[in-house]
Image (spheres, rainbow, N blue to C red):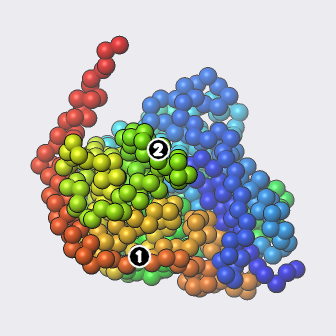
């Protein structure tokens, strides 16, 4: 047996699963393997059938998750040539809320032949939005009843979360609801497949299932008010033990250990959410530091020492991110997606020719050109709602806006204005948290956007006036999952007894962006104008965006 010890983090994304082997003592990433899901995102037709799915459906095949365990884990062991005996723990993270109905024997209902042809028996992916009617009803009923839990979630429960999705199953496939022994988050289900032990993690329970550490789930009377058939939902189908993030779920069963190439009994951490697992992987395990998980969208996460109500937050959960603290979550619905939309639809062909001639990406070219501009020089200002607003307005019907364009406006000026808009959106979130009494004095960043766009990161530092530390790891969710795996193993086996100890040894910062004083002053002026537009179009003074969407919805093109 070698002296070095290792942990494996498995990051379950929307299209694929990634396993990463990490050296426990240093956090060095030794090997990575990615396995695409064979069925990917199922949003048109149920696999193996001619059954068409309706609009806003998004399903997955749970067999794809198990294939990640069977293929990716043996691959990292093979590539690294380490002894499986030296792997002391593993953890997983997942998109959320990604949920499924489960049979009494632990199989997903869609794995049973008699239910394979029923779409409601399959995994409902996080972006399954077909339960919006149920979410709308839930929010209206909760508000009318004065349910206290609403304030913890910014005033609205999302259609992506588990209760609306369960209610949709009940409404549209009551036979599936009845036969389901329980409804589970996919991260808990996969953990159960590895260990044979059924536990729910405090992260998804708190953020996605309206569970509170002190108060539990909402009462039976609330669920009865939603639908009499839901009165006993918690007792009958959500009754698995809830354990804190950082806990050990159990050990690998002999069967799963054989399939994965690991030793039986290897410690498995309780499941986690991808963005939340990234927080300790960015080195953040104490309050006052907001982590931005930056990609197509941004998830903003911060720790606090007490529970506060923050307008428009996605949730506050005790032990939701790191044990012993309240974890706050907010977010922006589109960031990288906005830049991608602009490049695909609005950039002149001549710019692509320039980028091609220099063998650089179109984003690199636009960044170079935009970096030559001084804040405010373009005369442009944008609103970052091109995919609705997640925080702090919590309104999916809001849309994007560009103000100040002229016949002389250039592509790089718009590109920079869009970056600035997303930075102002982040600053609105930071400001709202601070005003609610949640301390934020430093920003941390991880994810793809933070690694490859220096201009964007500097604009964020200037727009917020806060120093930004960028995590070294390119795969912080997987690293975070591996860190929790090391904690599940414990110090005695070569791991760590707490996530605080793991973060001190397994993480690092690769770059720091400091605010530039003259830019901070200029952005303060632009942000003041942004706030005026933000409140005017977002808080009801002018609902033109919603009226335009309604006109669009009711207008059909002539063919």
Task: Using the image as rendered, state which of residue 73 and residue 489 is in the foreground.
Answer: 73
Q: CA distance from mark 2 to mark 1?
A: 29 Å
Q: Residue sitting at 35 percent across and 38 percent down?
A: 133
**Residue 436: quadrant of the picture:** bottom left
Q: Is residue 216 above or below residue 396?
A: below
Q: Position of residue 218 (x, y in %)?
A: 38, 58
Task: Using the image as rendered, state which of residue 467 and residue 504 is in the foreground.
Answer: 467
Is residue 270 visible to us here?
no
Q: Residue sitting at 56 percent across and 52 percent down?
A: 359
Residue beneath disc 2: 352
Is residue 83 visible to us here?
yes
Q: Position of residue 446 (x, y in %)?
A: 49, 67
Q: Is residue 263 above or below residue 379?
A: below
What label does residue 513 carry, if any? 1
Q: Residue sitting at 61 percent across and 69 percent down?
A: 479
Nearer the viewer's eye, disc 2 or disc 1? 2
Task: Using the image as rendered, state which of residue 529 and residue 241 is in the foreground.
Answer: 529
Q: Secondary structure at mark 2?
A: helix
């Amino acid at each position: 047996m070698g002296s070095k010890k290792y942990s494996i983090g498995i990051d379950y994304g929307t299209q694929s699963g990634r396993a990463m082997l990490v050296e426990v003592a240093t956090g060095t990433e030794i090997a990575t393997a990615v396995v695409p899901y064979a069925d990917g995102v199922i949003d048109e037709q149920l696999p193996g059938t001619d059954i068409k799915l309706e609009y806003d459906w998004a399903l997955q095949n749970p067999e794809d998750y198990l294939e990640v365990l069977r293929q990716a884990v043996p691959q990292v062991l093979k590539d690294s040539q380490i002894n499986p005996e030296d792997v002391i723990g593993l953890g997983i993270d997942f998109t959320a809320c990604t949920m499924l109905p489960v049979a009494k024997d632990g199989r997903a209902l869609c794995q049973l032949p008699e239910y394979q042809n029923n779409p409601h028996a399959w995994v409902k992916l996080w972006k399954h939005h077909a339960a919006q009617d149920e979410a709308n009803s839930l929010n209206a009923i909760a508000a009318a009843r004065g349910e206290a839990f609403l304030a913890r979630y910014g005033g609205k429960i999302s259609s992506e979360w588990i209760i609306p999705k369960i209610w949709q199953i009940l409404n549209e496939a009551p036979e599936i609801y009845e036969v389901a022994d329980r409804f589970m988050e996919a991260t808990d289900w996969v953990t159960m497949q590895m260990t044979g032990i059924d536990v729910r993690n405090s992260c998804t329970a708190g953020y996605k299932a309206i569970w509170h550490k002190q108060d539990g789930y909402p009462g039976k009377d609330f669920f009865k008010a939603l639908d009499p058939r839901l009165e006993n939902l918690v007792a009958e189908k959500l009754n698995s033990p809830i354990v804190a993030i950082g806990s050990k779920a159990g050990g690998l069963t002999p069967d799963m250990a054989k399939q994965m190439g690991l030793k039986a009994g290897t410690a498995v951490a309780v499941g986690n959410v991808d963005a939340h697992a990234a927080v300790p992987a960015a080195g953040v395990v104490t309050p006052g530091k907001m982590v931005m998980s930056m990609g197509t969208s941004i998830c903003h996460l911060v720790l606090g020492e007490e529970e506060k109500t923050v307008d428009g937050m996605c949730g506050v959960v005790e032990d939701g991110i790191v044990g012993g603290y309240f974890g706050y979550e907010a977010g922006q619905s589109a960031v990288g997606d906005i830049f991608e939309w602009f490049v695909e639809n609005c950039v002149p062909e001549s710019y692509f020719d320039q980028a091609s001639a220099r063998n650089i990406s179109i984003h690199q070219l636009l960044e170079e050109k935009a970096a030559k501009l001084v804040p405010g020089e373009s005369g442009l200002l944008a609103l970052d709602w091109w995919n609705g607003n997640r925080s702090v307005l919590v309104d999916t019907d809001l849309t994007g806006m560009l103000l100040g364009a002229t016949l002389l406006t250039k592509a790089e000026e718009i590109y920079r204005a869009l970056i600035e808009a997303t930075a102002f959106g982040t600053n609105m979130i930071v400001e709202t948290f601070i005003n609610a009494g949640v301390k934020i004095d430093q920003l941390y960043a991880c994810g793809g956007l933070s690694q490859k766009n220096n201009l964007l990161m500097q604009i964020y530092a200037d727009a917020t006036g806060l120093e930004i530390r960028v995590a070294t790891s390119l795969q912080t969710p997987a690293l975070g999952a591996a860190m929790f795996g090391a904690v599940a193993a414990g110090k005695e086996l070569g791991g760590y007894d707490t996530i605080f100890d793991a973060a001190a040894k397994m993480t690092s910062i690769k770059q720091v962006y400091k605010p530039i004083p003259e830019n901070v002053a200029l952005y303060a002026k632009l942000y003041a104008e942004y706030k005026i537009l933000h409140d005017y179009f977002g808080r009801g003074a002018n609902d033109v965006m919603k009226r335009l969407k309604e006109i669009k919805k009711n207008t059909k093109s002539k063919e």
